[in-house]
Image (cartoon, helix red, strand yellow):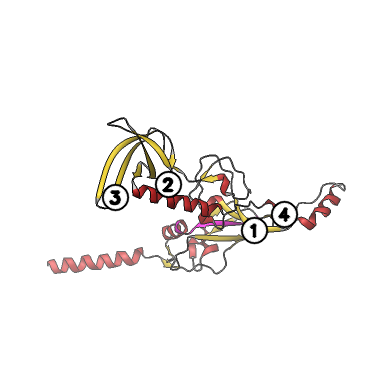
């Protein structure tokens, strides 16, 4: 009798797994949005009834939408579609199929000026903001898009890809359509003044730990001052994450690596 129960349980498990398995779909070779709304059918073949599920909205004509591949994969799974992402894509760039409306001069006097400027009005595609952002906002994939802008308006420190920007914090208010510049961004704060922080000293097999209060703010890799909650003495440490910091040889290495990444991003 027990064998029958076990066999029945295994069969039920297999049936359940089969029912939960999603419809396999493949990413389209060209991702194009034609109406300002990106749907699952714009991204994948054979989406069936799930094709009308919206992935992104408000895509402006003439701009390309940057999507987080992991978030798209999870959304597809929620609606019964299975995209394996076997190549490990991190971002999906959806090209807008709508033409941006040309801006016509409103007066006869404006036309000679437009004609005179046309020779120097070369355009290029760069990463821009798809919405306005406030100081302290953390940039997400949906906040970015690729747009055509004047060559002379491209910042000298424009990032190479969206991956260089996503997860960073905004220093100052930024407007929709503005080209991305590294000088406007910084690593998000993981330590704030008065936070209680676990400070670790690690050197080979020696590991020591203490609790201290942050005397200022810090991002990952930044040096900041803390006060030992027991002795009340001040110490300097390198932030490694929310509520965590390092001192000693390992801290110096973390700080060097963080500085190298910031310099590479700024180039």
**Where does the image place residue 166, in percent across and percent down from the top left?**
50, 51
**CA separation in Å, label 1 and label 2:** 32 Å
**Where does the image place residue 146, in percent across and percent down from the top left?**
61, 56
Of the two numbered discs 4 and 3 on the same chain, state the one appearing first in sequence.
4
Closest to the observer: 165 or 54?
165
Q: Which mark is drawn over residue 125?
A: 1
Instruction: Say which element carries label 1.
Output: strand
Q: Which residue is mark 3?
A: 203
Q: Nearer the viewer, mark 4 or mark 2?
A: 2
| Mark 3–mark 2 CB contact (< 8 Å) | no
| Mark 3–mark 1 CB contact (< 8 Å) | no
**Where does the image place residue 43, in percent across and percent down from the top left?**
53, 63
**CA separation in Å, label 4 and label 3:** 62 Å
Give the quarter of the figure containing the N terminus.
bottom left
Instruction: Say which element carries label 4.
Output: loop
Q: Which residues are magenta?
A: 61-70
Q: Nearer the viewer, mark 4 or mark 1?
A: 1
Q: Residues within 10 Å of mark 1 (few under 14, many from 20)?
A: some
Q: Which residue is mark 2?
A: 221
Q: Is residue 116 left or right of residue 244?
A: right
Q: Residues within 10 Å of mark 3 (few under 14, many from 20)?
A: few
**Is residue 193 placed above or below 239 in the rendered structure?**
above
**Residue 140 lies in the magenta-colored region:** no
Q: Nearer the viewer, mark 4 or mark 3?
A: 3
Instruction: Give the residue at x 50% y 67%.
Output: 27
Q: Which residue is mark 4?
A: 101
Instruction: Say which element carries label 3.
Output: strand
**Where does the image place residue 183, in percent across and percent down from the top left?**
57, 46
Instruction: Give the residue at x 46% y 44%.
Output: 188
| Mark 4–mark 3 CB contact (< 8 Å) | no
Of the two numbered discs 1 and 2 on the same chain, state the one appearing first in sequence.
1
């Amino acid at each position: 009798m027990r064998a029958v129960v076990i066999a029945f349980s295994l069969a039920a498990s297999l049936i359940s797994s089969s029912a939960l398995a999603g419809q396999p779909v493949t990413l389209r070779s060209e991702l194009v949005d034609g109406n300002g709304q990106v749907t699952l059918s714009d991204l994948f073949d054979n989406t069936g009834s799930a094709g009308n599920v919206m992935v992104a909205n408000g895509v402006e004509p003439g701009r390309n939408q940057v999507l987080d591949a992991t978030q798209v994969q999870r959304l597809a799974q929620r609606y019964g579609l299975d995209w394996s992402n076997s190549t490990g894509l991190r971002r999906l760039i959806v090209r807008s199929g709508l033409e941006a409306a040309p801006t016509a001069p409103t007066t006869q006097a404006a036309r000679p000026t437009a004609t005179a400027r046309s020779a120097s009005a070369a355009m290029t595609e760069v990463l821009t903001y798809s919405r306005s952002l406030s100081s302290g906002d953390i940039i997400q994939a949906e906040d970015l898009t690729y747009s055509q802008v004047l060559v002379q308006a491209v910042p000298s420190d424009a990032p190479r890809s969206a991956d260089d920007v996503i997860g960073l914090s905004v220093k100052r208010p930024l407007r929709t359509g503005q080209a991305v510049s590294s000088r406007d961004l910084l690593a998000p704060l993981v330590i704030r003044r008065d936070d209680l922080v676990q400070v670790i000293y690690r050197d080979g097999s020696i590991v020591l730990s203490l609790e201290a209060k942050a005397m200022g703010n810090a991002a990952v890799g930044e040096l900041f001052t803390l006060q030992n909650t027991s002795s009340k003495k001040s110490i300097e440490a390198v932030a490694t994450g929310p509520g965590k910091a390092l001192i000693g040889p390992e801290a110096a290495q973390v700080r060097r690596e963080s500085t190298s990444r910031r310099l590479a991003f700024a180039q």
